[in-house]
């Protein structure tokens, strides 16, 4: 392992690149994803993580160190965390240190902040006009202003802070299709009713909104110089919506978004929570070279059978095992995952975030098991 | 088509406008409210069946709940005292520390459509409130919902509080939410678990001695 941290980060980035591209690897890389686990594991209250962007970055870097010998971070933490979540889902967030006790986990507040007539506003006046009305309803505006200032001053140099500590970065942006922010802003129940009652209007508004999210992804990954983004999916999951809705209001938007990012050379990590089993084969339509990142609810082995080497996998140790299982449970899950999906085209990661209440011994077992079962003296030529 | 069959079919197909029109037609034809509601229940059972066959998904369950709400608004005033015979009592809530309501609300909607009498305690419910509601209602089924892994500890504390109140033997407890599984169920001391509303209905009916037992 090189002494020079920048050189180490470069080597680790190269290992991630190889894994994404199904090239032989001498070990399966491990990326960390635990915005709440991270600060707690190094003694930083979640209120400080949420309310001070520098603390958020520093505590994440300390947490990466504490995890041991790992390659890097799945999604770069930068800025004021509640602002990221409110922007992504257009939802209010209950924040530790404000509405919640200092070390409790942030949570989405399900409220209808977007009205039915806002679809017309989007269609007739544009998406930015709509955002102008919705941002004050979902964001804490003092934090929002701080976040904008912090991002303008710090975003471009944040990746270097990770690299100076020796860590690679898989993605530096977190975006999604209009279905998700619309669902967050309307509230889930009302939005699903809209999808049944006025699908054409919802679609017309989504058509207007989509370029905003694509352009934002391009702008942020350009600013950071890290050409990778999450393309997120939560309530758009196959298990959540009927095929009729999914085919009209979900799939076409993922397709277009992924195509546009691909054309710009931006890696798409399909961060897909919930169960996507029904529609896995549709992802073969996407350009080769994405990363599929389920959360343990999708059958990852079946997904591998269907998708083959069309995309790499971020797998997928479930939150329930990390939070409530034993180190042996974690070991077993990792061993079987590497056996069934490795050695090529696999990056080890928690399924979605590592839960904030993951016992330290489970986190240690997670890394140790990855090294024990995913290290090769000679890079294996044969991959599944 | 028979008026009640039209209701059953429209609900089973999750066709909102047709279902409401069919109920209004039945009301206009003086079909008794109890028969209309029974047809609705059968339509909902069809929705549940298709959900288990993976032909329907969460959006269909939510829409079914919404259609039923509208039908209850139409038919409810026609019910006479003694018409409604609930199939059993259930106390339900999202445990302390968790403010997510969507999963809970879908399950409660399905439980009510299955003719169960549900006490909805809301979100972020402390253990003592669950115990109090069980005592007051006499419910024999307790449903604990939680989306986040932080809910595990609260579920465990709630079940311990039920035991401390001497009610554990009389009350069957189910837990539900996106991250629960058999291991979590054993660790918190619940009787069963689920990640979908249809299983919750099946368990509640089984435990209260209703259909599907």
Image (cartoon, coloured by chain):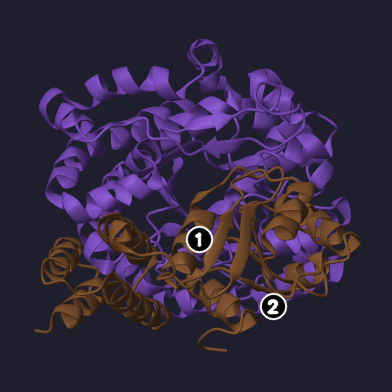
Horizontal arrangement in the rendering, residue A252 relative to residue A90 (left or right): left
Q: Residues within 10 Å of mark 1 (few under 14, many from 20)?
A: many
Q: Residues within 10 Å of mark 2 (few under 14, many from 20)?
A: few
Chain the render paints purple:
A
Looking at the picture, how far across and down is residue B206, in whole percent? 60, 83
Does dot 1 land on a helix, a strand or a loop? helix
- Residue under numbered circle 2: A336
Chain of residue at mark 1 = B
Nearest the viewer among A242 and A261 is A242
Looking at the picture, how far across and down is residue A87, in whole percent? 43, 30
Horizontal arrangement in the rendering, residue B41 relative to residue B180 (left or right): left
Instruction: Give the Cα distance between marks 1 and 2.
Output: 37 Å
The answer to which quarter of the image holds residue B63 is: bottom left
- Residue under numbered circle 1: B108
Looking at the picture, how far across and down is residue B39, in whole percent? 28, 78
With respect to residue A91, does A372 lie above or below? below
Nearest the viewer among A76 and B184 is B184
Specify whether residue A259 is in view: no
The residue lying at 22 percent from left, 65 percent from top is A244
Report which colour depicts chain B: brown
Q: Residue furthest front?
A: B81
Nearest the viewer among A328 and B100 is B100
Looking at the picture, how far across and down is residue A108, in whole percent? 54, 38
Q: Which mark is residue A114?
A: none
């Amino acid at each position: 392992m090189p002494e020079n941290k920048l050189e180490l980060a470069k080597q680790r980035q190269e290992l991630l690149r190889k894994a994404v591209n199904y090239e032989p690897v001498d070990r399966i890389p491990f990326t960390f994803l635990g915005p709440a686990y991270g600060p707690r594991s190094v003694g930083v209250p979640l209120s400080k993580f949420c309310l001070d962007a520098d603390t958020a970055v520093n505590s994440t870097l300390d947490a990466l160190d504490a995890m041991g010998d790992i390659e890097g971070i799945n999604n770069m933490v930068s800025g004021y965390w509640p602002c990221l979540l409110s922007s992504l889902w257009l939802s209010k967030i209950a924040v530790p240190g404000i509405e919640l006790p200092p070390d409790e986990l942030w949570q989405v507040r399900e409220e209808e902040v977007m009205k039915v007539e806002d679809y017309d506003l989007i269609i007739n006046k544009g998406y930015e006009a709509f955002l102008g009305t919705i941002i004050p309803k979902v964001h804490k505006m003092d934090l929002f202003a701080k976040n904008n200032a912090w991002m303008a001053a710090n975003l471009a140099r944040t990746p270097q802070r990770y690299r100076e500590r020796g860590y690679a970065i898989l993605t530096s942006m977190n975006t999604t299709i209009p279905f998700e922010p619309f669902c967050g802003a309307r509230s889930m129940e009302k939005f699903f009713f809209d999808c049944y009652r006025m699908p054409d209007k919802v679609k017309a508004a989504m058509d207007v909104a989509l370029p905003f999210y694509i352009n934002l992804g391009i702008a942020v990954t350009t600013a950071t110089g890290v050409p990778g983004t999450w393309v997120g999916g939560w309530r758009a999951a196959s298990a959540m919506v009927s095929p009729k809705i999914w085919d009209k209001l979900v799939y076409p938007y993922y397709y277009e978004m992924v195509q546009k990012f691909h054309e710009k050379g931006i890696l798409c990590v399909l961060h897909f929570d919930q169960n996507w089993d029904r529609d896995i084969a549709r992802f073969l339509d996407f350009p080769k070279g994405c990363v599929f990142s389920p959360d343990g609810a999708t059958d990852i082995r079946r997904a591998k059978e269907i998708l083959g080497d069309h995309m790499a996998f971020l797998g997928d140790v479930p939150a329930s095992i990390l939070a409530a299982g034993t180190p042996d449970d974690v070991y077993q899950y990792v061993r079987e995952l590497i056996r069934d999906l490795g050695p090529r085209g696999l990056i080890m990661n928690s399924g979605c975030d590592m839960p904030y209440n993951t016992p330290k011994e489970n986190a240690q077992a997670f890394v140790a098991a990855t090294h024990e079962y995913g290290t090769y003296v000679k890079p294996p030529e044969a991959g599944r | 088509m028979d008026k009640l069959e039209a209701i059953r079919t429209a609900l089973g197909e999750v066709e909102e406008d047709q279902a409401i029109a069919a109920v209004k037609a039945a009301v206009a034809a003086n079909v008794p409210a109890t028969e209309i509601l029974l047809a609705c229940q059968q339509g909902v059972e069809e929705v549940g069946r298709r959900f288990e066959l993976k032909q329907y998904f969460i959006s269909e369950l939510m829409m079914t709940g919404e259609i039923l709400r509208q039908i209850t608004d139409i038919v409810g005033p026609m019910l006479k005292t003694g018409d409604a015979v609930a199939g059993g009592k259930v106390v339900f809530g999202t445990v302390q520390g968790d403010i997510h309501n969507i999963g809970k609300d879908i399950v409660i909607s399905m439980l009510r459509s299955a003719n169960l009498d549900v006490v909805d305690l809301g979100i972020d419910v402390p253990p003592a409130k669950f115990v109090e509601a069980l005592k007051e209602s006499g419910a024999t089924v307790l449903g604990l919902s939680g989306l986040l892994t932080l809910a595990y500890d609260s579920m465990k504390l709630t079940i311990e509080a039920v035991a401390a109140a001497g009610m554990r033997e009389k009350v069957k407890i189910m837990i539900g939410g996106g991250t629960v599984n058999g291991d979590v169920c054993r660790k918190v001391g619940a009787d069963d678990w689920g990640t979908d509303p249809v299983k919750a209905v099946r368990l509640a009916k089984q435990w209260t001695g209703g259909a599907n037992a």
